[in-house]
Image (cartoon, coloured by chain):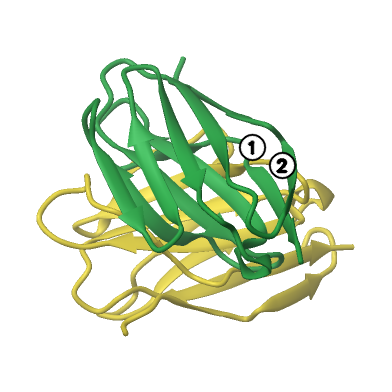
Chain colours: A yellow, B green
């Protein structure tokens, strides 16, 4: 069964460093998302991506964040200068079909720890 | 503002003891409500999609229902392997697929 994969599973970094979180969405999906979940809190939307451009971003997704689909399979989230409060689980999700109103399938997540 | 509230926050059941989880939502025009299961340290696992009031979906011991203001996830005769956090989410305003999640209900089923 197709699934969303994410690497690495755990990333530890120093405050101020750049990190890149990687995702491989399900192959025929067209809509891609990043969410984050701070320990003990709700899953929060960060950004949606369609047709090689951002379709919506949240207030959390400031200038320190960027997303890219560098090739036909990968979808990345970059944090340019990490802060302590960026420590969280980051989930990639994708959905298929011709509408964004279908179920989203989530990856296993990357646990980001900023020291 | 779009909002999702789940109750209770935590639920402990004995194996075989049926119960229901609640998800109340406030959105300007519901375009879809989703139930996910999340195990500790893992990503949300899709369970159900509901689009209109009166709709019901079933999968094994789980049944999801939807009204104009809330959704219920009914668990019939649960087993210990049903222990997890159950998340409810709705589409936010706009048409980008942004999901708004509730806090979740953590279910523990004891043998």
Q: Which residue corresponds to mark 2?
A: A41
- Between marks 1 and 2 in the image, the one whose residue lies nearer the viewer: 1
Q: Horizontal and vertical percent for residue B75?
A: 52, 49
| Residue B87 disc label | none
- Residue B26 horizontal/vertical position (percent): 43, 17
Q: Is residue B56 above or below residue A83?
A: above
Q: Identify the chain of the residue marked 1, using the numbered disc in the image.
A: B
- Residue pushed farthest left? A98
Sort mark 2 into few (<14), some (14-19) or many (20+) by Cα contacts within 10 Å.
few
Real-space CA distance between mark 1 and mark 2, rounded to the nearest whole angstrom: 7 Å
Q: Residue at x 83, y 51 (%)?
A: A84
Residue located at (23% from left, 51% from top): A102
Q: Secondary structure at mark 1?
A: loop
- Closer-to-camera residue (A3/B40): B40
Q: Can you tell which quarter of the image residue A73 is in?
A: bottom left
- The local secondary structure at tag 2 comes to loop
Q: Are marks 1 and 2 in contact (CB under 8 Å)?
A: yes
Question: Where residue A54 sits: x, y (%)?
Answer: 32, 48
């Amino acid at each position: 069964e197709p699934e969303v994969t994410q690497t690495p599973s755990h990333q530890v970094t120093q405050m101020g460093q750049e990190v890149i979180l990687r995702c491989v969405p399900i192959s025929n999906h067209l809509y891609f998302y990043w969410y984050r979940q701070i320990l003990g809190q709700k899953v929060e939307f960060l950004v949606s991506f369609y047709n090689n451009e951002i379709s919506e971003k949240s207030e959390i997704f400031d200038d320190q964040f960027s997303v890219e689909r560098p090739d036909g399979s990968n979808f990345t989230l970059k944090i340019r200068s990490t802060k302590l409060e960026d420590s969280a689980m980051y989930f990639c999700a994708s959905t298929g079909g011709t509408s964004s109103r279908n179920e989203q399938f989530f990856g296993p997540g990357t646990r980001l720890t900023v020291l | 503002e779009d909002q999702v509230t789940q109750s209770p926050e935590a639920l402990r059941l004995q194996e075989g003891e049926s119960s229901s989880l609640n998800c109340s939502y406030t959105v300007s025009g519901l375009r879809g409500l989703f139930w996910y299961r999340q195990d500790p340290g893992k990503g949300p696992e899709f369970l159900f999609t509901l689009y209109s009031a009166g709709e019901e979906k079933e999968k094994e011991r789980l049944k999801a229902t939807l009204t104009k203001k809330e959704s219920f996830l009914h668990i019939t005769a649960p087993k210990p392997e049903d222990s997890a956090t159950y998340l409810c989410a709705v589409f936010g305003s706009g048409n980008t697929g942004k999901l708004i999640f509730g806090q979740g209900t953590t279910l523990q089923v004891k043998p």
